[in-house]
Amino acid sequence: MMKIDTAKIHVKGGRGGNGCISFRREKYVPRGGPNGGDGGRGGSVILEATAGMSTLIDLWHNPHQTAENGQHGMGKLRHGKDAPDRIVKVPAGTLIRLAETGEMIADVKQPGQRVLVARGGLGGKGNARFKSSTFQAPRVAEKGEPGEERTIELEVKLIADIGLVGYPNAGKSTLLARTSAAKPKIASYPFTTLAPNLGVVRIDPEHNFVLADIPGLIEGAHEGAGLGHDFLRHIERTKMLIHVIDAAAVDGRDPISDYEQLNKELESYNPRLIRLPQLIAINKMDLPDAQTNLPRIKDYFSKLRESKAHRAGDRVFSISAVTGEGVDRLIRAAYQLLQRINQRIHERQETELDQPTFHIPKSQERFELIRGTNRFVVRGEEPRRAVLMTDMENDQAIVLLHRKLQRMGLINALTKAGIKEGDTVQIDEFEFTFSPDGIDTN
């Protein structure tokens, strides 16, 4: 079954353009100098949070996101153009993890926040960059660096103002349908709602809020039973809850036990959830059994208030989502409470700095040596980049590579580690025979 709130995608930055090998060729300049331009940078893959999305369904159909390559350098010192970044839209409220390790990269909550998940490769230098007093006619240029490539996992935690919670068939979907323009599928059996539904509740033309009908909950959900974590994940971001209780007990369960058990599940999953303000909607008052159970339910909540066990802001409302009885009073009370919560959030945010653009950090170490029998494996972004940007078919380029490795301290590190002439050195997919005087690629 397709899950529209999670996705696994493969992202790949564009390769940098190759540097150009070129020399001036003019009528009266028989020995014109090098004038090959640099390659352009490859595009990066960037995820951007947007308020206009609530699911990852588009990425289910397009799991491969690749940025364009940079343009190659040209003669007459013309540099290749940088490729544009590939901007991938995701819903605000998306968690981004590395698929291989599960490591969290970012949590984008605000529309407009960006995460750089695959950098584009650097453009290669043209031969004009290698000219020196002792190297007047370099016939060497760098290849473009490959872009980063990785698989990431996305998970949406819906950002709704108010979440509707309650056991299956409590009437949440009916309440959402009555109070908003949402049209959830409704039927008389448990687990009707298999995915969260969002609806915009309009108080008047200028005031509204987002209400989320969350899938039904069963005992053991915090351990993954039933819809389990799929349910609980979506209420972590809400600011308050409307707890819908089936007062008619149409499924044969006790309304008070349902209320207590659901709160235990919320607390077991995340203690923060039980501290959220709740409004209690005693639903199905259009049914005779609900009228019979109402005095006992009201007495239960009255005793909770007297014992001060009730959370601040909790209030109890008798409603019928089918007929609309009491619904308007519930919604207006929810909106007023939400306004107070939003004011506190706004005051707190004014004291916080804006979050910077996220990116996946690179390793701080220049390189790492792994020793084997007559073999050394080198890991690290800097030596890897140097090798991948070298034209291994060009003898001058190989000489320059050896100098780069010397400057970054790799040759000295290998010598201190006990490497001997003739031992094999592996960097990325390339293998070399070690010599302190140069590199043998044969």
Image (cartoon, rainbow, N blue to C red):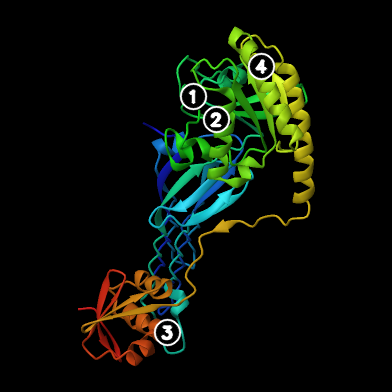
Q: Is residue 392 left or right of residue 202?
A: left
Q: Which mark is residue 214?
A: 2
Q: Are marks 2 and 1 in contact (CB under 8 Å)?
A: yes
The amino acid type of the residue labelled 3 equals: Gln
Q: Are marks 3 and 1 in contact (CB under 8 Å)?
A: no
Q: Is residue 66 above or below residue 420?
A: above
Q: Is residue 151 above or below residue 54?
A: below
**Residue at 61% from the left image edge and 24% from the top image edge:** 244
Between 181 and 29, the residue placed more toward the observer is 181
**Residue at 43% from the left image edge and 74% from the top image edge:** 382
Mark 2 or 3: in front is 2
The amino acid type of the residue labelled 4 equals: Leu
Q: CA distance from mark 3 to mark 1?
A: 73 Å
Q: Which mark is residue 294?
A: 4
Q: Earlier in the sequence, mark 4 or mark 3?
A: 3
Residue 202 visible, this angle? no
Q: Earlier in the sequence, mark 1 or mark 4?
A: 1
**Residue 193 pos. (x, y %):** 49, 24
Q: CA distance from mark 1 to mark 4?
A: 26 Å
**Residue at 52% from the left image edge and 47% from the top image edge:** 95
Q: Earlier in the sequence, mark 3 or mark 1?
A: 3
Does dot 3 land on a helix, a strand or a loop? loop
Mark 3 or 1: in front is 1
| Disc 1: which residue | 193
**Residue 276 pos. (x, y %):** 67, 39
Between 272 and 31, the residue placed more toward the observer is 272
The amino acid type of the residue labelled 2 equals: Ile
Q: Is residue 217 left or right of residue 225?
A: right
| Disc 3: which residue | 136
Q: Which mark is residue 265?
A: none
